[in-house]
Image (cartoon, grey):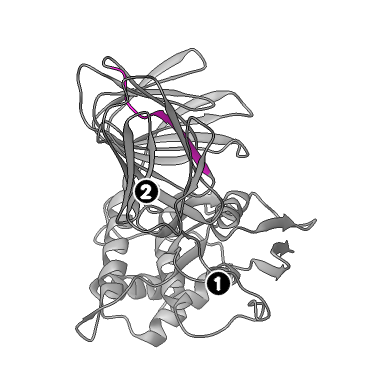
Amino acid sequence: MTEQNRLAELEQKWLNGSISDDEAKEYAAWYNSAQNNPIVIPEHIASSKEEHKTRILEGLLAKLEYSNGKTLEPKPMWYRNKTYLGIAASLLMILGIASFWFATENKAPENTITTQDKKAGTEGLVLSLENGETVEIDSLADGLIASQDGVEIYKKDGAIYYKGEAGKISYNTAHTPKGRKFEIQLPDGSNVWLNAESTIKYPIEFAVNQRKVLVSGEAYFEVTRNENAPFIVETEDQTIQVLGTQFNINSYSNENASRTTLLEGKVKISCQGEEHFLTPNEQITYDRNKETLAKSEVNAKQSISWVQGYFNFQDSDLAGIMKQIERWYNIEVEFQAGVDQNQTFSGRTSMNQNLSEVLKVLELSGIKTQLQNNKLTVIP
């Protein structure tokens, strides 16, 4: 049997759930051997790249979800992207799935962190009132936490919300430091989730004909519909206008691009003198270096994995991955000379585990790190 036929046989076994542990190891070993030969995907397996990815992912999720009749938490998944010729690019997801499964074995890589570690981030927020008073939400019990101009601010079940009417223009600024994320219910009933190191400024009572907020960092919105008062979000690069919808904004000032991704409804985006409309599963990316806009089709749900407690990287470069790790674990990341920060990875793993567990998964893809005194160094 030729190598190509053997690999096709292993893939078919993966898809129908009959692959053994030894066969999965064989498949993963082939991927990790850094071969680069094109592989043709038989038509009976998939008629298109998207169908192929979907079938592979469905097989993976089914395999992770049930074991001996018990529901399991999703295990860490990660793979390093490689460059292939022609149809071989379609095989990328297969190879990734094989290495995902292989990476879940309880085998410690040579370069795992053993002397130091960092706990995962948690829920938390710093709320700044109009009068300069600040309220740290982290340790406060549920109930009334502040009052401002006739409006009462409450904390309940890991979120804050507003009650009352201000009768005047007055603002709050909510900020999540590194290692924190939080949910806010805005005065109009809209909900917003802030990722780590993010800020939103908003009035404690919206105007009758407009609802406007300012955002930096990353935020996911579920906007209450009001046709008489458009909801407007301003970031460093973009202005997003909606009536009622669900969308995610990623606009960190220390990154090279900002992205707006639509899950439901419709939004209008203004940026650099251009206007674009998004429909569900579309994303606008603004490249700050090139000063260009690009629209693309995406799986929008992946953009809010962080809300559900997961890192989810799709063709993400190492620099961007480390920025997310830096923000969530409240550390500093440094790259030594010789590290390719542009190499890309895809994968998914829980945000609710210690830093060492996340790094073990990365190290299986060849990324070496050292943690000392709150500084994570990436070494060649």
Residue 190, position in %: x, y? 27, 36
* Residue 343 can be seen, yes or no: no
Residue 335, position in %: x, y? 73, 56
Please determine whether, in this image, residue 32 is positioned above or below residue 123: below
Q: Residue furthest right?
A: 337
Residue to which mark 2 is pinned? 304
Residue 71, position in %: x, y? 24, 77
Q: Main secondary structure of the magenta part?
A: strand
> Which amino acid is tagged 1?
Asn
Residue 227, position in %: x, y? 19, 19
Residue in view at x 37 percent, y 48 percent: 304
Cα distance, mark 1 to mark 2? Answer: 30 Å
Q: Secondary structure at mark 2?
A: helix
In this rendering, position of residue 354 left or right of residue 55: right
Residue in view at x 53 percent, y 73 percent: 357
Label 2: few (<14), some or many (≥20) within 10 Å? many
> Which amino acid is tagged 2?
Ile
Q: Secondary structure at mark 1?
A: helix
Please determine whether, in this image, residue 224 is positioned above or below residue 153: above
Label 1: few (<14), some or many (≥20) within 10 Å? some
Query: Front-most of 282 and 29?
Result: 282
Q: Please identify the quadrant where the N terminus is shown.
A: bottom left
Query: Front-most of 325 and 344?
Result: 325
Q: Earlier in the sequence, mark 1 or mark 2?
A: 1
Mark 1 or 2, closer to the camera: 2
The label shown at residue 32 is 1
Query: Front-most of 234 and 151?
Result: 151
Task: Report the span colored magenta.
Answer: 198-207
